[in-house]
Image (cartoon, rainbow, N blue to C red):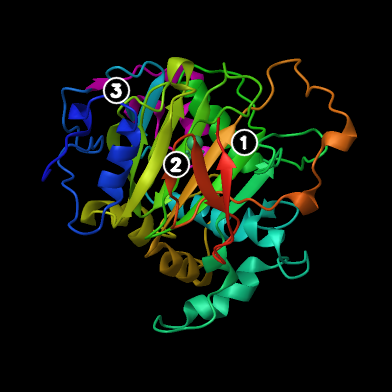
């Protein structure tokens, strides 16, 4: 099959898996002509314009977090996926570097949790950035060993997701970053969800050969709240399926600065990232070339300018990496975690599974995740 239109794959036992493998394939490279590219509005028959609420966020509020006025955002829906909203890079020129540096320098810091904590002591993972700067500033080539930053696969924020039990719990919680909360609540408000509370975050760090297996995010206790996702750096193919694994997915590109909101009927759909791709020419400018051009930050801005030495490290890292930030509201208003006898709770020490790595293999009803690049793989039942 030289060409495979995702939309033409019939539903069947492993329709999603087939499409996943198709886009993951290296040799020969797959045909990407059926992949929806919201940044180019193609293919247009599936794309519909999404209606936002420009009054929900003032232009000043938007600028404070590095976003264009909401009326200028290019927001789309996909036919057949009610509640799915794709916003094509609404960031102001030069503001992505702030968020990128937060993901690489700030959010991996304690008390947040990352994959490296699973087999390293807190003192060893205390300063991931500081320990990586020198290595990443050295011209590439055969440098050994890889820096901690290059071995980072995931970071959790707020209610820290437990990969083993697939739960959040009240006794494993740290403060959610105020800046990311602000960004998340403004974006969701503009999408028609006022009062969104960012309570948990999962940051994914992808290398060019990484992928993320087929899954549904269902661990949050209130599914009426949307799930929010931000992408930075290199591009990716995102597959959005149905409520059953058998439903064939739609493939779309995600570029740096793009946002996705999965709400309503799309909140619990299967999805996956089979492939990371080099960002197209026009897109690298949005995150690589325009750093430190935020010269007129308002006094009230959440953003800070990124020093050139920090940006050097970020841009080198991003030459072959993609960052993804997902933000979740875990509890509905007034909701609390169910009481679980403490004997049944797993301790952090027992938490060994990770999120994803370059060897993610699909198995019916399961996805493989690993805690680190040391490829300690663990297969977790998904359903
Ligand atoms: C997730 C997820 C998708 C992405 O973290 O649950 O689906 O774009 N991420 O990396
Ligand atoms: Mn997900």
Quarter location, residue 257: top left
Give coordinates of residue 110: x percent, y percent. Answer: 74, 56
Q: Nearer the viewer, mark 1 or mark 3?
A: 3
Give coordinates of residue 323: x percent, y percent. Answer: 46, 52
Quarter location, residue 76: top left
Give coordinates of residue 109: x percent, y percent. Answer: 69, 58
Residue at image point 45% right, 66% down:
317
Left-right relation of 332 to 78: right
Q: Residues within 10 Å of mark 2 (few under 14, many from 20)?
A: some
Left-right relation of 30 to 80: left
Give coordinates of residue 49: x percent, y percent. Answer: 27, 20
Left-right relation of 253 to 338: left
Q: Nearer the viewer, mark 1 or mark 2?
A: 2
* Label of residue 193 in the image: none
* Residue highlighted by disc 2: 363
* Residue highlighted by disc 1: 181
């Amino acid at each position: 099959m030289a060409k495979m239109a995702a939309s033409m794959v019939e539903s069947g036992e492993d329709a999603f898996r087939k499409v996943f493998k198709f886009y993951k394939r290296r040799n020969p490279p797959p045909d990407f002509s059926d992949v929806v590219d919201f940044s180019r509005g193609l293919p247009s028959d599936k794309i519909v314009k999404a209606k936002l609420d420009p009054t929900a966020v003032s232009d000043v509020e938007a600028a404070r977090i590095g976003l264009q006025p909401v009326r200028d955002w290019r927001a789309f829906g996909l036919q057949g996926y009610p509640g799915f909203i794709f916003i094509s890079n609404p960031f102001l020129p030069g503001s992505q570097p702030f968020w990128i540096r937060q993901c690489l320098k700030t959010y991996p810091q304690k008390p947040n949790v990352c994959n490296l904590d699973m087999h390293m002591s807190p003192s060893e993972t205390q300063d991931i950035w500081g320990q990586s700067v020198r290595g990443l500033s050295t011209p590439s080539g055969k440098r050994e060993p890889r820096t901690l930053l290059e071995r980072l696969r995931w970071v959790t924020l707020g209610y820290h997701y437990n990969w083993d039990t697939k739960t959040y719990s009240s006794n494993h919680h740290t403060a959610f970053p105020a800046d990311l909360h602000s960004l998340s609540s403004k974006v969701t408000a503009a999408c028609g969800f006022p009062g969104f509370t960012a309570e948990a975050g999962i940051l994914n760090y992808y290398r060019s050969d990484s992928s993320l297996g087929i899954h549904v995010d269902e661990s949050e206790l209130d599914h009426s709240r949307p799930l929010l996702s931000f992408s930075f750096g290199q591009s990716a193919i995102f597959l959005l399926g149905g409520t059953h694994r058998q439903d064939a997915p739609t493939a779309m590109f995600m570029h740096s600065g793009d946002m996705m909101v999965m709400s309503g009927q799309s909140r619990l759909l299967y999805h996956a990232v089979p492939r990371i791709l080099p960002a197209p020419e026009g897109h690298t400018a949005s995150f690589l070339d325009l750093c430190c051009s935020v010269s007129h930050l308002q006094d009230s801005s959440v953003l800070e300018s990124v020093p050139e030495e920090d940006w050097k490290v970020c841009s080198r890292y991003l030459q072959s990496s993609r960052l993804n930030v997902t933000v979740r509201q875990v509890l509905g208003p007034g909701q609390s975690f169910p009481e679980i006898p403490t004997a049944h709770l797993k301790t952090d020490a027992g938490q060994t599974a990770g999120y994803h790595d370059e060897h993610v293999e699909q198995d019916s009803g399961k996805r493989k995740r690993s805690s680190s690049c040391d490829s300690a793989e663990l297969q977790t039942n998904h359903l």
